[in-house]
Amino acid sequence: MVPHLTTALSGPLLELEKHFLDNATAIEHWMRGQWQEHTPPFYGSTDLRNSGFKLAPVDLNLFPGGFNNLNDAFLPLCIQAAQAAVERICPGASQLLLIPENHTRNQFYLQNVAKLVSILRLTGLKIRVGTLLPEITEPTVLELTNGSKLTLEPIQRSGGRLVMKDFDPCAVLLNNDLSGGIPALLQGLDEQWVIPPVHAGWHSRRKSNHAAAYDRVTREFADVIGIDQWRLNPAYDTCTGLDFHARAGEQELADKVAAMLDSIRAKYREYGVTDEPFVVVKADAGTYGMGIMMVKDAAEVTGLNRKQRNKMSVIKEGLEVHDVIIQEGVHTFETVEGAVAEPVVYMMDHYVVGGFYRVHTERGRDENLNAPGMHFKPLAFETCCSLPDSAQGPDAPPNRFYAYGVVARLALLAASVEIEETAPIELAELAA
C-alpha cells in the first residue's frame, strides 16, 4: 500500500505523473514481482527532484535520520511496515539493539532516534539503544528539547554477539552509516543479524554503484510502462584519483562535466526544455550534503578557489575525497509557501511510510537544498492509503503524489540490488 501524500501545493499533475497513474496496475504488478526476487532494505529514504519533464531520485540513504520529521499520521503505517521488515529478516525476533550515530549534541538527530525507538517498540519488540561512544560507561538518559527522553547504554561483546546487561538481542539495527569504518565492536558478528549489513556503510558503499543499479532497474521499468528511461534517471559518470588541493585530475573532471552537459542539452532540445542544464559533482561516498558542487560550465571545476577546494576535498569524519560521481542535475519546480522545496520519501521494507519536504528559502531550483538554513515541512495523509483511483482526475487527492511513491520504490529496489551485488563473497554464498 502506498500512502498518497498531500500538501498545500495545487495545480494539475504534469504528463509524466499522469502516465504513472494510467499504468498503475502494470506498475504494481511489476513491483510485486521484483520484491519476490530481491530483499528490500530494512529502511531507507530518498531525495526526489521533480522538474515536470523529469522526476528522479538524487540521493538514497540506507541509514535515514529524519523519522522525527514525519507527520504523526504516518505512525500506523510505519509500525505495520516495521513489523513486516522484522518478520522478513528475523521472524522470531523479540529483542533488538539499535546503534545510532555519535551525535549526542544534535537534538534533531536524537529526536529521530527516539521516534524510531517508539515505532519499533509498538511492533512488539524490546528495544534498547547502544552507543559506540567510549565515554558512556553506564546508562545515560538524555533529555530532548521536544520533551522526550532517550537512554544510551554501553555495548558489550560476547563472542560473535553484542549484548547489554540483562539484554541479549536477536538482531542489531544500525542507524549509523559507518563513514569512519567498521568499529572493532561490530566486526565478525556471525551470531546476530546486523541490519543493514555493514558493507552498506559509507566506508565501502559508492554512489556510483547505486546509480548503476538504478540505471538497470529503471531501464526494465521504462520498458514495462512505455516511457523514456531518461525521464526517471539522472545520467552519471565518475572521476577517480582526484586531489582537489593539488588540482590533480582537474582537466579530466572538466572534460567529463563538459561531455555530460552536452548530452543533457541534446535531451533538452529533444523535449523542448529551455532551462539551463547543470551537473552535480559530489563525493562518491558520504552524506550530510558535504562535498557537493553544482556546475553549469566545465570551466567552474578548473578554477576552484581555496575555500571551494577545501569544501570538496573533505567529507564526514574528515575523510579525504579522491573519487567523485558526476550526476545530471534535476531542477525542482516544487515550492512550499513560496520557497524552493524537494520531497524526501521514507520507506520501511518495501512500503512507502511517509515523507516531508526539505525547504530552503535562500536557494534556487537548481541548487543543493541539503544545506544550512533548510527546514522541513511534514507531508500529511489523505483519507486513505489505497492504490490510486483511476476514476478521478490526476490532481484528485488520492492520486496527488502517487508518482513520488513509485520513483522512491524504484530507488529502494536499486538499493536492494546494490546491496546484493556488493556483498562480501561469504555473504553472497550464504544467500545463495
Image: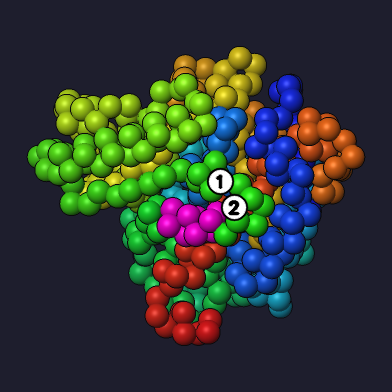
341 displayed left or right of 203? right
Q: Residue 165: where, in percent of width, then height? A: 57, 70
- Amino acid type of the residue tagged 2 in the rendering: Ala
Residue 360 showing in the rendered view: yes
**Closer to the camera, 35 or 108?**
35
Q: Secondary structure at mark 1?
A: loop
Q: Main secondary structure of the magenta part?
A: helix
- Amino acid type of the residue tagged 1 in the rendering: Asp
242 up-or-down from 9: above or below: below
Residue visible at 48% across and 38% down in the picture: 106
69 up-or-down from 118: above or below: above
**Closer to the camera, 253 or 428?**
253
Q: Residue 247: where, in percent of width, then height? A: 12, 38
Q: Secondary structure at mark 2?
A: helix
3 displayed left or right of 183? right
Residue 280 showing in the rendered view: no
Tell me whether circle 1 and circle 2 mark residues in contact (CB < 8 Å).
yes
Residue at the farthest top position: 338
Residue visible at 64% across and 66% down in the picture: 34
Q: Residue 3: where, in percent of width, then height? A: 77, 45
User: Mark 2 or mark 1, which is nearer the start of the sequence?
Assistant: 2
The stretch in magenta equals 211-219
Q: Tell me how the rendering is colored.
A: rainbow
- In the picture of the structure, the residue carrying the numbered disc 2 is 222
Q: Is residue 218 magenta?
A: yes
**Closer to the camera, 28 or 378?**
28
**Closer to the camera, 240 or 79?**
240
- In the picture of the structure, the residue carrying the numbered disc 1 is 228
